[in-house]
Amino acid sequence: MENMWKVSVRGVRGAMPRMDRDYMNYGGNTSCISVDCKEEVVVFDAGSGLLSLSEFLQNQKLKRVHILLTHLHLDHIMGLPAFSLLYDPEAEVHLYGQKPENSAFQTQIGAVFHPPYWPLSLKDCKASLHIHELCAGESFSIGSRLHVRTLLGSHPDPCLYYRLASFGETDKSIVYALDCELTKEMENQLSDFSRDCRLLIWDSNFAPEDIGQHRGWGHSTWEEGVRVGRTANVKQLLATHYDLHYKDNFLKKQEYRAKQSCNFIEFAREGMEITL
Ligand SMILES: [Zn+2]
Ligand SMILES: [Zn+2]
């Protein structure tokens, strides 16, 4: 069990948080999933779900975290300004994201993490902050054991998908593909990118019956995730990033339908943990 990875679901919602009672079974925080890889903690996206990670990291001996951002839509970054680790002088925070064409990644984040939108700015962070600008297709390492590949996404604004893997351990691999509109070309690319991975975390923003009216919004369905998962031979599929209008009873019906047609799909709920 020593080397097991622990995947923790911290935010499952797209667009905006929902904290009403009808959303609490699946959860109302926006996108954030952390992976405790033992020697390193890796986080996919920094939605409002990121805040629950603060408590976990404050109790760690090594306060170091690597946050991989798919893109800068608010639901994927809104947890950053209130992430207490950023203000902790003993902490080390690495932020990764796509290098913009005509600007710097840090400038783009700093534009919203700044008065008058927030009382503090990036320069007020006391943690040792490392910004990593990535080009789509680039690969990099985290520490001596983790390897990350990137893929250019399909979304209205620039977006990256990630494949996190452990050197030499084939059972430890995660593909994170939020937010994604599935064109034929994207489906082929994602099927290759996700080949034989242990866990595919999938944009399931719209129910299959609703996607028709939302073409061009940059999102997918759980059904499309099942298709990619089968082609790519993934072991487990995790549906998440639910539309902000989908209440628990609606999602429960979707989950039931999905599980009737696929034996490797799970619907993400906040607080859920998956061990790899
Ligand atoms: Zn989103
Ligand atoms: Zn988005």
Image (tube, helix red, strand yellow):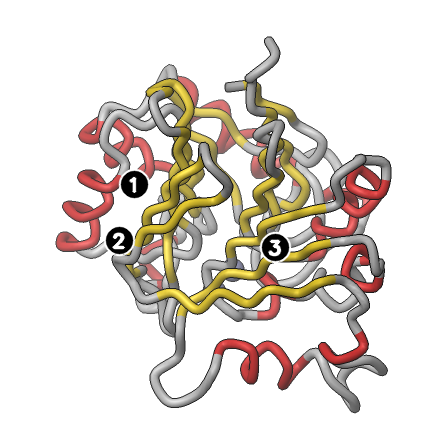
Given residues 190 and 240, the one toward you in this image is 190
- Asked whether the beta carbons under mark 2 and mark 3 sit within 8 Å of each other, the answer is no
Q: Which is closer to the viewer, label 2 or label 3?
A: 2
Residue type highlighted by circle 1: Glu
Of helix, strand and loop, which one carries label 2?
loop
Which residue is at 61% across, 55% downward? 245
Q: Which is closer to the viewer, label 1 or label 3?
A: 1
Respond yes or no on whether mark 3 lies under 8 Å from ligand 1: no
Does any portion of residue 209 appear in the rendered image? Answer: no
Residue farthest to the front, as pictured: 144
Respond yes or no on whether mark 1 lies under 8 Å from ligand 1: no
Q: Counting residues from the N terminus, which is met first, the one under dot 1 or under dot 3?
A: 1
Give x and y (percent) for residue 169.
37, 20
Where is 32 relative to 269, above or below? below
Q: Which residue in the protein does label 1 denote?
A: 224
Give x and y (percent) for residue 237.
41, 29
Q: Which residue in the protein does label 2 denote?
A: 182
Q: Alpha carbon of mark 1 to alpha carbon of mark 2: how far?
A: 8 Å
Give x and y (percent) for residue 143.
50, 41
